[in-house]
Amino acid sequence: MSSVEGSKREVEITIPVAEVDAETERVIASIQKKVKLPGFRPGKAPASLVRSRFASDIRQDVLESLLPKHFHKRVEQDNLKIVGQPSITDVHFHTGEPIKFKAEFEVAPEIELGEYRGIVVPYREPEVSEADVEERLNKLRDSKAEYANIDPRPIENGDYAVISLKSVEGADPPVEQDELMFHVGGEDTLKEFNEHLTGATPGDERDFEVEYPEDYGQERLAGKKVRFHAEVKAIRRKDLPEANDEFARDLGDYQTLDELQETIRKTIFKEREMRAQQEAKESILDKLVDAHDFPVPEAFIDRQIETQLEGQLRSLAAQGVDPRKLKLDWAKIKEAQRERATRDVKASLLVEKIADREAIEVMQDEVDREVHRIAKQRREPVASVRQALEKDGTIRRIAGHIRTEKALNFLFDNARKEVPAD
């Protein structure tokens, strides 16, 4: 007997009494060989005494042996693809009777694919203007800028002030820097520094309070009022290199400025193309999920939520935040992420089904390229990196990621792209 509800299944299983008795005798004999009881030599204690003295252990061993065996037999018989671990309930086990129990579990959903070719998505081929190239070129020049000290005078807007800075109160741990450079009047410089450094000359000292915004990059200062003592040490000017052929050659394998600008143009185009295609692929997935209705196993949703939370915790840790000190309500956070996780799982299952339908496979050289990239990044031998990746299962995940990307590229290539109205 079995029941069905969405991806959930429940089966009732009966184990014949003859098999139960045979397994019980086997377990008793096994215990009898190992047990030491007062008045009996090892292995010579009567079976009846073993049965009564170790009744609880015998019962547990019999159940652990027979229940999984008969559950998997039933699953194979019904041709079910189970997800996660079954929940065993209503176990009836009495001497001289068959064992009866119920098993509740989830199965992978049966997905009936609808149309997935020709999905309409908004997409515009990216464009790169001369101004875009010029802006990127100027950033490269900025990265190669040199700063030269200038003769002492009052600091003006646009100057680069070199100061020593020490917090007097409000910072924990305290701030103490012997040499910091501020772009006075710069958009990234806090207004309090601009106000109190303007007009100062090298050798001057200033005391002032800075109110840091809540979203300030350094967590220890965000949202705090800190009082500082500052001493102006020098004024510098920023010297940018000329944008010419010599600058291009200094940057790398370029002979002329034109070559560098063309490479910049192609780089910007590729970045925008990848971003535009990613947005289109996400739109395709949203439409696929909306068009297909099927039950999603709770085990898959829970796993997806856990993956999302782990990513968020890593992100917090990278910012220097200890999540354990935030007093977060993880139950509420998990519930808030449930809908997104469900859609992500459905999208993943659909992409996998489409990859199966279209016979999209991963070639060994595609995996090898990724392994070589990781080895180069880690500066370790390829063979040892491959062994480590195989041991922890990363190789399988790499192959799965490549297959997913190939399937998404297939969907994008076969979509109907329409330029969105401005």
Image: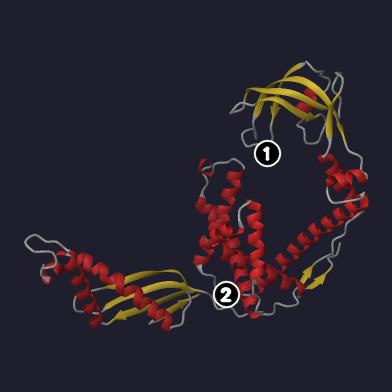
Amino acid at circle 2: Phe
Give, as a three-letter code, the residue at label 1: Gly
Q: Is 107 situated above or below 248?
A: below
Rendered residue at 68%/67% (across/down): 405
Colouring: secondary structure
185 vs 334: above or below: above
> Who comes first in sequence, dot 2 or dot 1?
1
- Residue 17: assigned label: none
Q: Residue 64: where, in percent of width, then height?
A: 30, 69
Q: Is residue 325 left or right of residue 152?
A: left
Residue receiving disc 2: 294
The picture places residue 158, in percent across and down from the top left corner, at 86, 30
Visible in this render: residue 94? Answer: no
- Left/right placement of residue 312 relative to residue 298 reads right
From this view, report whether residue 325 is shown above or below residue 169: below
Give how far across and how far down residue 85 sits, in percent.
42, 68
Res. 217 mark: 1
As measured in the structure, the alpha-carbon distance from the residue carrying label 2 to the one carrying label 1 is: 43 Å
Camera-side residue: 87 or 399?
A: 399
Q: Secondary structure at mark 1?
A: loop
Q: Quadrant of the C terminus?
A: bottom right
Residue 221 visible, this orientation: yes
Q: Residue at x 84, y 58 (%)?
A: 269
Q: For residue 94, which quarter of the picture? A: bottom left
Contact between labelled residues 1 and 2, with CB atoms less than 8 Å apart: no
Which residue is at the front of the view, 284 or 176?
Answer: 176
Residue at 22% across, 75% down: 26
Q: Crowding at label 1, few (<14), some or many (≥20) Cα neighbours within 10 Å?
A: few
Left or right: where 47 falls relative to 186: left
